Image: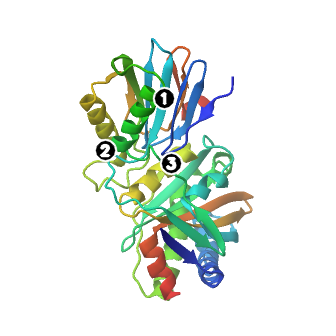
Amino acid sequence: MSSVIVNTGELFVGQSPAVIESLGIGSCVVVCLYDKSKKTGGLAHIMLPKDDGKDNLSSLVIDGQTQFEPLQPAKYADTGLDQLISKLLNLGSSFSGLTAKIVGGAEMFTIHKNQPETIGSQNVTAVKQKLRETDIKIIFDDTDGNVGRSVKFFLETGVMEIRKKNTYS
Amino acid sequence: MNTYTISPQKLKAFDVLVTAGIKQASPALSKLLCQEVTLTTSSSGVIAPAKLYEQFSHPEEVITAISFRVNNLEGIILLVFPRDQARKFDQTALPEVASILAGLLLRRLSTDAKLPFVHSLPDTTTDMFKAIFDEITANLALVSKNIFILTLELTFEPHHADARLFFLLSSRDIERLFAKL
């Protein structure tokens, strides 16, 4: 069956037999939540650790053409996970039945070493903190490292497939 | 809602400046690669991050990217080769090739904008293009809510190799830069 692609900053929730996919995850963190008993789940593709509330929609007019930035409900770990959980509960998921699988948070370059913590590491920390605060157990963790990843999340089984660059070489 | 406008006149000025800077690279590249190298440029422009993903065939397309931070700017320069194109060069030479191009581009910008720009040491990675660009845009997003991406297509002869130069800048710095052109 065809899958739903979730791009950076986006999220999607659904139920079996839906398949959700995110491609080319670098420093971003993908969070997959699953309710085994209801076979419902969702995926959020987190880009940054924390919403500072300063985001404003902007349009770019380049050579007379307006280019709007897309809405990104899952851009930040804190507000994005709130939305993902809320949408899953609205879909009938049981809060106590939710478990999490997390992937990403890589460091693709070393030129940002002057920062105390890489953006990937900041994202992983923020996601884990938010899941701890909400008492959602992490049952699978493939984060950090320096390689890009793609994931495919099957809501029939809760299984997650991970592909890395070497799969293609 | 903020609206940022880049006029056709500014785009043209940028194109002339960048093309002139990059075209000076052939002698240095010839010396580095020990053969006569001709570098041609085409199709420069400015795009929003949302349009970045249209520049590649698939998010998982594997590319080799050599990146540099730029002092005095919230900006990153990347020289990007599709994997099959990167293989046309001695891999150890790619960071030097990128350093030559980034150096000439910034020298030209420094002269015209009367601002001193210097790039960092090169950092090379080969991976899925989206994974690479997500980290670059995320790091810039920490310091600027709006990012512009300057692009320039390059062809190296006699290698028949295509590459693309990306210059990612915060909205504040692209305005600062374009105001000087």
Q: Quadrant of residue A62?
A: bottom right
Q: Which residue is mark 2?
A: A122
Number of residues whose C-alpha sits closer than 10 Å to that of mark 1, classed few (under 14), some (14–19) or many (20 or more): many
Q: Which residue is mark 1?
A: A42
Q: Is residue B38 visible?
A: yes
Q: Nearer the viewer, residue A34 or B63?
A: A34
Drawn side of residue B42 relative to residue B127, left or right: right
Residue at the spot 43% in from the left edge and 74% down from the top edge: B173
Mark 2 — on which chain does it sit? A
- Return the x and y of residue B135 as percentages of the image width and height: 44, 50
Q: Nearer the viewer, residue A15 or A90?
A: A90
Please tell me whether mark 3 sits on a helix, a strand or a loop: helix
User: Do labels 2 and 1 touch, CB within 8 Å?
Assistant: no
User: Do labels 1 and 3 touch, CB within 8 Å?
Assistant: no
Q: Amino acid at mark 1?
A: Gly
Mark 1 — on which chain does it sit? A
Alpha carbon distance from label 2 to label 3: 17 Å
Drawn side of residue B157 relative to residue B117, left or right: right
- Return the x and y of residue B120 as percentages of the image width and height: 39, 65
User: Which of the two discs, 2 and 1, sits closer to the camera?
Assistant: 1
Drawn side of residue A165 relative to residue A140, left or right: right
Mark 3 — on which chain does it sit? B
Q: Amino acid at mark 2?
A: Gln
Please tell me whether mark 1 sits on a helix, a strand or a loop: strand
User: Which of the two discs, 2 and 3, sits closer to the camera?
Assistant: 2
Q: Amino acid at mark 3?
A: Ile
User: Do labels 2 and 3 touch, CB within 8 Å?
Assistant: no
Alpha carbon distance from label 2 to label 1: 22 Å
- Return the x and y of residue A141 as percentages of the image width and height: 37, 26
Q: Is residue A13 above or below residue A26?
A: above
Q: Which residue is mark 3?
A: B132
